[in-house]
Amino acid sequence: MLGIIHANICPHDSRNGWRNVITLDPQAQAQLDLNVGRANAGTAAWTIRPQRALPQLSSIRDSTIPAPGGPVPVRIYTPEGAEPFPVTVYIHGGAWVGGSIDSVDPTCWFLAAESRSIIVSVGYRLAPQTKFPGATEDCYAAIVWVADNAASLGGDPGRIAIAGASAGGNLAASVTLMARARGGPPLAYQVLVYPVTDQQMNTNSYMEFGVGYMLDRERMLDARTQYLRSEDDRLDSLAAPLLAEDLSGLPPALIITAGYDVLRDEGEAYAKRLREAGVPTTNTRYEGMMHTFFNAATGFDKTFEAISEASAALRGAFGSV
């Protein structure tokens, strides 16, 4: 497992006046260079890495689940092997205004195979059509549905976890607070990948990496404006889990952060708060990586290291190492 490395900061970076002593991973740098070149040419780019073959699964199927705001689409990935499997609810990113179950499809393939758990990927409602806390309610409805229907999926209702990246990490963390407040369903584990845990956007990592590293400060500011109903929502713990007064009694956690990411510091601050509240928490910073690296479509070497780390943590929590 990669340890947490707190790098020193020194001035002078061509993008925004700051630079981390740990240099950007060569694969990430090549991706940024390609994006800049394509942007200058007026075309889009996502990845230059060769794609890995998707692992073999038993089945993948699309369905819908009931939620207070109406049916929510889900995609269910079932690994090969003997039932019953544990179940992991996965929540995609996209700054609450974008992303879909399609955008994280390869990630869920790998997670299902490596964690040996059924992955239920949730297509929650997006802003600005659906404001906070609509997406959170959709994701909470998903864990309730999984708990009620796990057996029919070939799953074990006693072994349910939640995971998410970026805005999905924010929603996953918020769902754990909702489950605690509402008396369940119990969750065995939470995997939060570069989660949004605060809405203030004033950390050092926002200063260092606010321009030019895949997720810009201005994009986050615009997304926050579209997602939240008012400025008061910035202080609601379901929008900003870092502000929750009490984090005790939440599921054990793995929090993955990226060294070159505006969300790095608030993710690591949330890990610290969880540990202080007595929640067993592992925090791994992937130095040299930037936002979006966890998506298997990116295809960096560290992408698959992080997916393997998350999968191993889930297997350990489920007792299926």
Image (tube, rainbow, N blue to C red):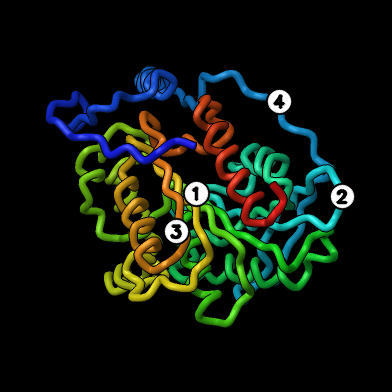
Dot 1 corresponds to which residue?
A: 165
Dot 4 corresponds to which residue?
A: 53
- Marked residue nearer the N-terminal end (4 or 2): 4
The amino acid marked with disc number 3 is Asn
- Marked residue nearer the N-terminal end (2 or 3): 2
The relative height of residue 11 versus residue 316 in the rendered view (above or below) is above
Residue drawn at (32%, 35%), measured in percent from left and top? 260
Check disc 4: other Cα within 10 Å, few if <14, some if 14-19, many if 20+: few
Q: Find residue 82 and name its label.
A: 2
Kindly report the distance in space between the C-alpha atoms of the residues bearing marks 2 and 3.
Answer: 32 Å
Mark 2 or 3: the one toward you: 2
Kindly report the distance in space between the C-alpha atoms of the residues bearing marks 3 and 4.
Answer: 30 Å
- Marked residue nearer the N-terminal end (3 or 1): 1
Q: Are marks 4 and 2 in contact (CB under 8 Å)?
A: no
Residue 145: percent from left, percent from top:
71, 70
Q: Is residue 57 left or right of residue 9?
A: right
Residue 139: percent from left, percent from top:
58, 65
Q: Is residue 89 left or right of residue 38?
A: right
Which of the two residues, 152 or 223, is positioned nearer the viewer here? 152
Q: Is residue 42 visible?
A: no
